[in-house]
Amino acid sequence: MPTSKEGEKRNKMVIICSKGSLDMAFPPLMLATTGAAMGMEVHLYFTFWGMNIISKKTIDSLKISPVGNPGIPMPNILGMLPGMTSMLTSMMQKKMDKIKMPSIREMIKTAHDSGVKFHACSPTIEMMGLKREDLIPEVDDIIGAATYLELASEDAITLFV
Amino acid sequence: MASPQTGVKPTTIVDSRGTMCPGPITDLFRAYRNANIGDVIELLATDPAAKSDTEAWTKRSGNEIIAVIDEKDYIRIQIRVVKKGK
């Protein structure tokens, strides 16, 4: 990975969170919290289904789907049966509780307290018919692609989840 | 003097045993934010990633590990706060 100045490490991270399933909500939050703990400036940009992670209505009901998920040892045709998504979600929840994994809400609180910035994508908000008050209070602002690019172009680590 | 086998008397003990990544680092960071220069934070962890993650954290934040002590089923990592960020 190239750095801007020889030997100088990047001190900023911008992550696009585009997915709204439980398994895809954890990685950006874990990286963000760790980045902030390491003294980095961290921005999370929530777009498309990622909006489910910061919407009051959906934050506590994120799910994991067996369909189209090759990591799950279950044929897609079985995964399509009613109740499979809930079953898999509760199985994963039990596993996460067993290793004392914090909940999404707890992870968001820790990230926010550590200085991680939460940005919501404006076109997605429009498309989903959401308002600012439909989002959790940790969301700092509603921004567009230009602001994202401005943030990301300042020599940041950029990830798309 | 601190020896890598026994360590020193810590200013604060952070018990992260039972939590997995990023638990130990976020717990350490919380203690670090309340610490003063010269303090020794002792992190207790069972996460197998704790040692390498703490090394990465100290390297990044400019602080130092003074002792890593292996206990029976956990690890004690002593970190001296030599630099405080914003």
Image (cartoon, rainbow, N blue to C red):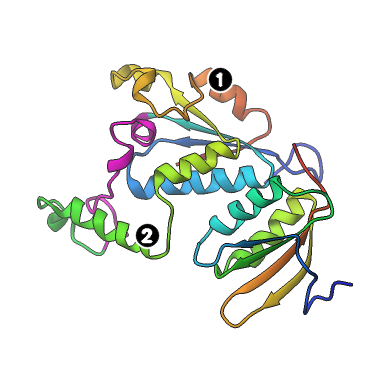
Which chain is home to disc 1?
A
Instruction: Check the image and report above or below for A3 versus B51.
Output: above
Tell me which amino acid carries mark 1: Thr
Tell me which amino acid carries mark 2: Met
**Which residue appears farthest toward the right when viewing the image?**
B1
Neighbourhood count class around disc 1 (C-alpha, 10 Å): few under 14, some 14–19, many 20 upward = few
- Where residue B37 appears, x then y in whole percent? 83, 50
Membership of A52 in magenta stretch? yes
* Residue occupying image coordinates x 38% and y 35%: A50
Membership of A31 in magenta stretch? no
Q: Does the magenta stretch mainly form a helix, a strand or a loop?
A: loop
- Where residue A43 appears, x then y in whole percent? 56, 33
* Residue occupying image coordinates x 44% and y 27%: A137
Q: Quadrant of residue A46?
A: top left
**Which residue appears farthest toward the bottom when viewing the image?**
B72
The answer to whether residue A102 is seen in the rendering is yes
Determine whether label 1 and label 2 are within 8 Å by CB: no
- Where residue A40 appears, x then y in whole percent? 67, 40
Range of magenta residues: A48-72
* Residue occupying image coordinates x 56% and y 62%: B16
- Mark 2 lies on residue: A96
Quick one: A56 or A18, which is closer to the camera?
Answer: A56
The answer to whether residue A160 is seen in the rendering is no
Quick one: A144 or B86, which is closer to the camera?
Answer: B86
Q: Quadrant of residue B56?
A: bottom right
- Mark 1 lies on residue: A147
SS for callout 2: helix
* Residue occupying image coordinates x 42% and y 64%: A99
SS for callout 1: helix
